[in-house]
Image (tube, coloured by chain):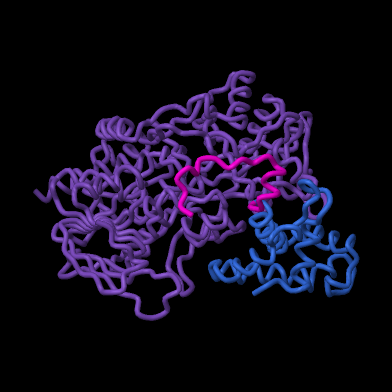
Amino acid sequence: MTINGEKEGRPYSESYDYVIVGSGAAGAAAARVLADTGASIALVEEGPAVDARDFDDKLYPALRRLFRGMGAQVSRGRAFIPVIQGRCLGGGTTVNSAIVWRLPEDVWDTWAQAYGLADAIPLRELQGHWDTIERELSVRPTPPEVWGENNRLMDKARAKLGIQAAPTMRNESGCRGSGRCLTGCPSGAKKSALVTFIPYAEKKGAAVLTSAPVERVVVKDGRAIGVAGRFDRPGAKTGVAPFCVYARKAVLVAASAIQTPGLLRRSGVRSWHLGRHFQGHPGSPLVALFDQKVDMWTGATQGFDADHHRRDGRFKVETISLPPEGAVLRLPGVGRRWAEAIGQAPFAALWAVQMRAYAEGRVSERFFGTDIAYDLRQQDVDILRRALRFTAEMFFAAGAREVLPGIYGMPERIGPDELYLFDSAPSDPASYTFILSHLFGTARMSRDPGDGVVGHDFGVHGVKGLFVVDSSIFPTNIGVNPQHTIMAVAFLAAQRIAQRNT
Amino acid sequence: MRPGMVERAVFEALLPAGPGPKSKGIAETDFARFYEDFFKTAVLPMRVSCAAAVFFAAWVSPLLVGRLPPFLMLSAEDRELALEAMAKSPFYLVRQLLLLLKAMAALCYGADPGVREALGYVKKDDPERKT
């Protein structure tokens, strides 16, 4: 049953065993697990429900309909970094590239040893959940027939340089290489939560509320008893209907590392750690021009990645295909020079560096909305310089004619003999282009309430029946694409919460 | 809000006809409709930022190349130089304003069917698309 807030004119009030806030990787995975217990569930999503048949290949309508703040939500620091989040049913899984990585064991070791999470998030249990998720979401390496030239070139670089790189593991079945993951998969081949966990839970009786932003968790006598908000009807200035969804057993918050701390704060949760320790994986793109056509918009959006320096360099390199609008924007110049460069777009390949940055920021609520303070450290810029040089080396190994760094203070185009220029690239983050799309840590887990927001049972310290099951609880960033880890942790959390309530 | 003469001049200098895909500039796309739709539907911070970027380009960027505003009074070469000066400005905020203008232009230009065809973009996977 779906309650579409865009069309709902009357107040809504209903009771369920569990209320889950957020329908992305974490919320949908929790719903998938709880649906099997026979409990009644309400999955409450802030964004709209968008049918796969409505996914367009044009970027602006997709930004408007599927992304938070049209993709223009930015962090505040020396550089403004767009913080990209899906805001639709299925959350980030609807608009990501379906990349699947298990949490690296060295990262889990840090969680276990430095943060004492060995028993709270046991690796063995995660492995069992990963097996299940990989089976249910048809996870496999990107097949060569949908690589397209952008991905094929990285394979060429891998072979030439002998580096550790491979076809990306993705949750998809029947991908046709349309290069449209980021604007929503039109064929349903991407096994996002939108076409897997959410319909599964619905079949088992779950209610799905969409365009239903939760304003607060209702807490009575120290116990969470539901959530309240107002439906989001576009253009409506008055008469927007309120909703209140009561939880007989528990409220699970899976609203993301940006929204979860604000929701908890508005609900009366107080902790020095709430909103702090915000971490991410800043991504920075690099474009190269080849003599042959690349047509980056053809083939799997992200079908190849190199984790050669994941441990010793804290970065990974990924292919990424952008629709023509994105490709046009990434080309240098203004006026006639830009127009000429656009003519070269079919010959351009785009790869991006994904850093496991040291920087920690803070998410807070201000008068004008959510404020994300995040500034890269000097160590992060050092990582970036090395990562960009390595990526450029890969490009040249694949046969690139020139690389377009897009870095203020560097030449617009560099050749294979000028790689050394990256070593002295600017130290100011404002000279680079970034996006931030993997977000962690703003309600971190700790046994002691003095060290974090959420206990080892996933319950918010000091509030009964209120749990956080998303990447807010992660004590650190993880250096790989997080969807798979987020889902497995949500599976683990939902199982534990269900066991407590039987 | 339809683009006036000043707005059109800024964007036409940013992405002129001639060198681009099959000689098409932004003026040859449905820019007026895109611009109107953008300022009707974009989120408020985006609208405000883009309006500021257009204002800066129209009234301040000429000063960066030693010319007096408004932008409309500049020759085609000087208009391009003024925008280039924004792109190369030592001030991060000025560069960001130029980036916003480029983003708006790219969203319109890259979505144009003629431009897409010229780039060799083939739309795939819409067998069941609703009309």
Q: Residue furthest bottom?
A: A238
Say if residue A230 shows up in the picture.
yes
First to last magenta residue range: B111-131
**Which quadrant would residue B75 be assigned to in this image?**
bottom right
The quarter in which the N terminus of chain A is drawn is: bottom left
Q: Residue A23 in the image: state x and y as whole percent.
A: 33, 53
Q: Main secondary structure of the magenta part?
A: loop
Of the chain colours in the picture, the one used for chain A is: purple
Q: Nearest the camera: A69 or B34?
A: B34
Q: Residue A355 in the image: state x and y as whole percent.
A: 54, 41
Residue at image coords 76%, 60%: B27
In this rendering, position of residue A322 left or right of residue B18: left
Q: Residue furthest front?
A: B131
State which chain is coloured blue.
B
Residue at image coords 55%, 48%: A57
Question: Magenta span has A5?
Answer: no
Residue at image coords 37%, 38%: A484
Q: Residue A452 in the image: state x and y as whole percent.
A: 32, 54
Q: Residue B66 in the image: state x and y as whole percent.
A: 90, 68
In this rendering, position of residue A240 left or right of residue A306: left
Q: Is residue B123 above or below residue A259?
A: above
**Which quadrant would residue B14 be assigned to in this image?**
bottom right
Q: Nearest the camera: A220 or A213?
A: A213
